[in-house]
């Protein structure tokens, strides 16, 4: 035992294992390991992940730019898995484009770019790869999705981007896309999302100064999960026969809410915000709502439907849980000031066998 106390067990690991360990660190830290010993001198060159954060790095922008070029040049990992770069907007376009071209030629699997300040144009044809599976763009990136050639892309996240065209032809550009996340985009008035492969769709579109209402058309017959949190758009959802779960917080739906609910009436889990109920259901009667034959989970929530915002103090809430045979649960986040909406939805849900409502005598 005493003979092994001073032994360097980490250095005894294979290069493959060391590369995996270093892939969880920022690139500047992985490069620094080269000074530990001769054993570590070239280990960082096999790490399949690039994670560049300029604000955490160097004394000057020019030194960071030089560092990125050298790191890309000396890296010899058999497969490049992730390229992550923040503060893209502080660099000249030709530097960023050069780095992207480099990793695309290497067959990178996942790319994450973040731009906090000025608008950044994405060159036409720069995102062209058969190996890219995940693309996440956050910030004022200006681009046309139609210029992308990513036939095997499965996950696409766009936050704060400036779109030059609609997503109607997204099925031809990303034929295997399964997850699409859109947050606070701009640039177009009508958004058409048409995809036969899409399984998950999350949209958040909140602006402080609302102008014209935006129309969003969603055609995704295989969609299983839908998240909408929006104060400026009207949604037209078509053919959502595969939908299982939806979380909805919309303010501009008005009379179109009835059509929206009919389109998603086959789902199993539904969560609606009180804002949606107040502003959208004022002119609806119980008999106008669809029957949710498959619904086993219903929630009416005070804040945003994803729970990121705290509940406003104006409402008093309590949780009503109804258990059924087969361990199914129908949950209702009861809001006293809007309890009539709770009754409306419960009347239009499939009756749960063996359900017991411990508050039925005092609530209904």
Image: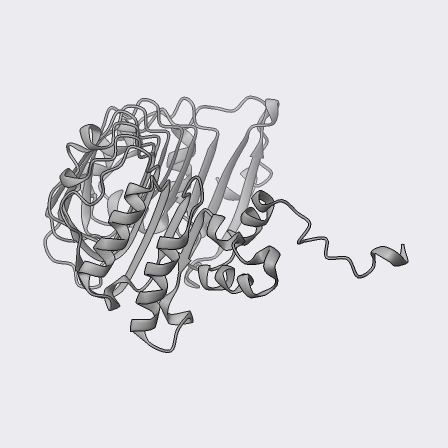
Q: Is residue 114 above or below residue 256?
A: below
Q: Residue at the spot x=43%, y=55% of the render?
A: 308
- Comparing 325 with 140, the one in front is 140
The N terminus - image quarter:
bottom right
Colouring rule applied to residues: one colour
Residue 268 shows in this picture: yes
- Comparing 337 with 243, the one in front is 243
Q: Which percent across, then down, holds residue 33?
A: 55, 62
Q: Residue at the spot x=68%, y=53% of the render?
A: 10
Q: Which percent across, then down, holds residue 161?
A: 21, 53
- Comparing 215 with 32, the one in front is 32
Q: Is residue 60 above or below residue 239?
A: below
- Which picture quadrant has residue 207? bottom left
Q: Which percent across, then down, holds residue 36?
A: 60, 64
- Comparing 167 with 301, the one in front is 167
Residue 304 shows in this picture: no
Q: Determine whether, in the image, residue 268 is placed left or right of residue 85.
A: right
Q: Residue at the spot x=35%, y=27% of the render?
A: 243
Q: Residue at the spot x=42%, y=56% of the render?
A: 51
Q: Which percent across, then down, holds residue 203?
A: 29, 45
Q: Determine whether, in the image, residue 217 is placed left or right of residue 152.
A: left
Residue lying furthest front: 38
- Which picture quadrant has residue 256? top left
């Amino acid at each position: 035992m005493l003979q092994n106390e001073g032994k360097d067990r980490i250095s005894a690991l294979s290069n493959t294992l060391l590369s995996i360990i270093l892939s969880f660190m920022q690139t500047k830290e992985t490069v620094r390991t080269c000074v530990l010993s001769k054993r570590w001198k070239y280990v960082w060159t096999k790490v399949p992940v690039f994670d560049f954060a300029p604000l955490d790095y160097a004394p000057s922008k020019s030194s960071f730019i030089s560092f990125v070029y050298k790191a890309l040049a000396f890296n010899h990992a058999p497969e490049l898995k992730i390229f992550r770069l923040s503060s893209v907007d502080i660099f000249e376009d030709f530097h960023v484009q050069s780095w992207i071209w480099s990793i695309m030629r290497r067959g990178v699997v996942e790319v994450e770019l973040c731009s906090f300040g000025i608008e950044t144009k994405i060159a036409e044809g720069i995102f062209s790869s058969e190996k890219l599976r995940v693309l996440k763009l956050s910030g004022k990136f200006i681009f046309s999705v139609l210029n992308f050639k990513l036939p095997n892309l499965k996950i696409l996240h766009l936050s704060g981007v400036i779109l030059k065209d609609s997503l109607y032809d997204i099925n031809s550009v990303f034929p295997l896309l399964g997850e699409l996340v859109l947050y606070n985009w701009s640039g177009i008035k009508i958004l058409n999302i048409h995809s036969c492969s899409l399984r998950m769709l999350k949209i958040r579109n909140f602006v402080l100064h609302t102008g014209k209402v935006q129309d969003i058309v969603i055609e995704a017959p295989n969609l299983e999960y839908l998240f909408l949190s929006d104060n400026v758009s009207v949604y037209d959802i078509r053919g959502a026969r595969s939908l299982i779960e939806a979380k909805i917080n919309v303010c501009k739906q008005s009379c179109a809410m009835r059509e929206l609910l009919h389109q998603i009436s086959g789902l199993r889990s539904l969560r609606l915000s009180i804002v949606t109920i107040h502003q959208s259901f004022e002119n609806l009667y119980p008999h106008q709502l669809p029957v949710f034959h498959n619904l086993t989970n219903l929630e009416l929530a005070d804040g945003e439907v994803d729970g990121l915002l705290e509940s406003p103090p104006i409402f008093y809430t309590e949780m009503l849980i109804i258990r059924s045979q087969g361990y199914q649960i129908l949950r209702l986040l009861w809001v006293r000031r809007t309890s009539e909406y709770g009754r409306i939805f419960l009347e239009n849900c499939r009756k749960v066998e063996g359900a017991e409502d411990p508050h039925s005598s005092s609530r209904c």
